[in-house]
Image (tube, grey):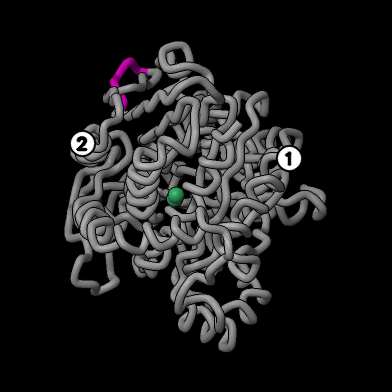
Amino acid sequence: MTRAINRRVVTLVAITMAALPAMGQTAPSSLAASAEQRLPALTETYKHFHRNPELSHHEEKTSALFAGELRKLGYTVTERVGKYPDGSQAYGVVAMLQNGTGPRLLIRTDMDALPVVEQTGLDYASIVRSTNAQGQDVGVMHACGHDIHMTVMLGVAREMMERKSQWHGALMLIGQPSEETIDGARAMLADGLYERFGRPDFVLAEHDDSVHAAGNVAFKSGPMLASSTSIDVTMRGVGAHGSAPQLSKDPVLMAAEFVVLAQSIVARQIDPQQPAVLTVGMIHGGAKRNIIPDEVAMGLTLRTYSDKVRDQIIIDVRRTAEGIATGYGVPQDRMPVVTVSRTEIAPVESNDPALTERMRKVAIGALGADHVDAADSVMGSEDVGLFSLDGKIPAMMFRLGAADPVKLARAIETGVPLPAQHSSLFAPAYAPTIKTGVTAMTAMALDLLKE
Ligand SMILES: [Zn+2]
Ligand SMILES: [Zn+2]
């Protein structure tokens, strides 16, 4: 997710890093001290996760390690929670800690990595390769920071275990698979997550980013992340020899035209007041230079904040594809196939206003007001919102700053943004990020479970 750099961050950078200020409240400052003390062990865990990334749907070793660490801490852990629509098992982890009676709090981390060849040059960089769903050999990298999220969760798990006298209720820690394919949360819910482990009273999550300085967290009340819809468009034609185009209906040319024309949908058919993004992220066709293939397949992602806009764009995509095919004289039985995924979809992520305000105050108490920013809405998406059951359960995701403050300051000065999530160069300043994540999330959990 690439976003405009938040200019307000500039003023915060100078005071960000050295040490978290003493708050004059024993609990919060001892939280930060405790997280600091655990940092060497957490760093090792982080680097292990980072070196050993696994793609969505394949988080076998990651989930086993994550579950094992929680078990060692004393949690009751269940693995392989989650069922995909095709019946296959997901690598979801549920770790429970029942501590008297009180509210039930779900905290979620994601666990999967991305098909990206890491280019950071770090000594703990990933060199893992794997085969993706299309059968291609790809590099694998924790380019979205889910390794940070898991590490933060393990830090929080330890703090909460050691502070059992300070809270009561049920803590439900979730290791979610397949966030990047946005079908992991749905798979866990479909496998009876709440029926088996209880329905939570609150849902919390965090996501790191490169626009806030490490040491800071950021909040946004209401909608923060866009809905995501995955669309497959296959332009079908009539194959022929590359030297005899007159015998073909060339799907490569049609696909090329589709990619260009699709840009006009958001630009010219959607109200400019309504944010929307339509990206063709995948295009595959052909096997040999001198063969005009029978078809070319494209994969699109669509982001919006409104169901009406989403539905309109799906109609426009279909009409654009069919219009091009008709223009090229493609026979009726070879019209394009447009499929909207029923599993790779996520609703708008909306942060419960009351919960967000309460947690923002807790974060200020734990980190100091200088370390709590306002987050912007972005066109990125998440399936964490599904755990709120359409907003019936108050849920909130906050942003965890992961940018090296010095580099961030330079980026703001020069206007050249830092590598963001999903970039092969994404390199969180892990130590302050993890420490801040553990401190903030533990403070929030303690607050929600003090009732
Ligand atoms: Zn991601
Ligand atoms: Zn992510």
Residue 289 lies in quadrant: bottom left
Q: Nearer the viewer, residue 407 or 204?
A: 204
Q: Is residue 84 above or below residue 363?
A: above
3D distance between C-alphas at marks 2 and 1: 35 Å
Classify 10 Å Cα crowding around label 2: few (below 14), some (14-19), many (20 and above): few
Q: Amino acid at mark 1?
A: Ala
Tags 2 and 1 touching, CB below 8 Å? no
Q: Nearer the viewer, residue 86 or 207?
A: 207
Q: Quadrant of the C terminus?
A: top right
Locate residue 201, reporting x and y percent: 59, 25
Whether residue 307 is visible, yes or no, is yes
Q: Is residue 220 above or below residue 327?
A: below
At horizontal 29% and vertical 38% (from top left) the residue drawn is 133
Q: Nearer the viewer, mark 2 or mark 1?
A: 2
The reply, left or right, for residue 188 in relation to residue 205 is left
Q: Nearer the viewer, residue 421 or 325?
A: 421
At horizontal 49% and vertical 34% (from top left) the residue drawn is 167
Q: Circle 2 sits on which residue? A: 72
Q: Nearer the viewer, residue 288 or 345?
A: 345
Residue 103 lies in quadrant: top right
At horizontal 32% and vertical 29% (from top left) the residue drawn is 93
Q: Amino acid at mark 2?
A: Lys
Q: Is residue 56 above or below residue 50?
A: above
Locate residue 71, reporting x and y percent: 23, 32
Magenta segment main secondary structure: loop
Whether residue 58 is visible, yes or no, is no
Classify 10 Å Cα crowding around label 1: few (below 14), some (14-19), many (20 and above): some
Local SS, label 2: helix
Which residue range is magenta in the image? 86-90
Pointer 2 residue Cβ closer than 8 Å to ligand 2: no
Q: Which mark is residue 354?
A: 1
At horizontal 82% and vertical 53% (from top left) the residue drawn is 273
